[in-house]
Amino acid sequence: MSKVYLLLALVAAVIAVLAVLKLKTAGGAKRGVYYLRKTLFTAAERSFLGVLERALPPGVRVFGKVRLADIFGVQSGLDASSRQSARNRIDRKHVDFLLVRVDDLAPLAGIELDDKSHEREERQQRDASVDEVFSEAGLPLLHVPAQQTYDPTDLRARVVSLLTLPKVG
């Protein structure tokens, strides 16, 4: 008889463990459709950002992965179709780095870090569209090829040159 109780206790324990595991698994599924990314930037972007931060002139700050729709607005006075088309051109796009003035956080320039993905046809079309938006709004945009290392002195000179360009428009 004690063997029966022992067997029932063992079966009950196994069922309890399985129930707990199922709850944990189901609980994970009930958390939603989102997950937390491990990092905001790729290794290449983090490397570049470290050099860029040291290369910035006084009074300039950098933000990363800023949506174009947060930088640019669409002119009023357009018909509804043109307005929506213009919004669609900047929707779901971002610039890798945005340089802003420390005092008021006004945008000064954008920087795109161009890795191998920028060699693909669809990416080149996207880049041309983004370039056009920056140009049309009069905000400079610098494309920097992704590299193993960056020369801080060269990067600083490029950034300073970019920030002293005459504004368009």
Image: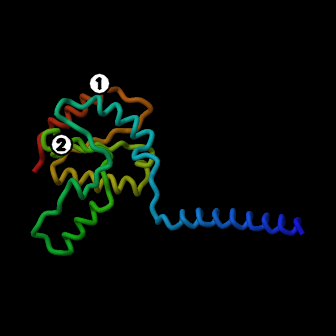
Compared across the picture, whether 80 is left or right of 68 comes to: left
Please tell me in which quadrant of the rendered image residue 112 appears: top left
Q: Residue furthest front?
A: 1
Disc 2, SS: strand
Figure check: 42 above or below 2:
above
* Mark linked to residue 169: none
Label 1: which residue? 153
In contact (CB < 8 Å): disc 1 and disc 2: no
Q: In this view, does 58 lie above or below 23?
A: above
Judge by depth and name the residue closer to the eye, 64 or 129. Answer: 64
User: In terms of depth relative to the viewer, which is nearer, 155 or 59?
Assistant: 59
Residue 80, percent across and down?
18, 75
Instruction: Name the residue at 15% across, 45% down.
Output: 106
Q: Is mark 1 on a helix, strand or loop?
A: helix
* Amino acid of disc 1: Thr
The percent position of residue 108, horizontal first and vertical second, equals 18, 42
Q: Which of 128 and 149 is in front in this view?
A: 149
Image location (x, y in percent) of residue 54: 29, 29
Residue at image x 28%, y 50%?
66
Q: Residue at position x 17%, y 54% from top?
A: 136
Q: Name the residue under label 2.
A: 108
N-terminal label among 1 and 2: 2
Q: Report the side of 37 relative to 124 (left or right).
A: right
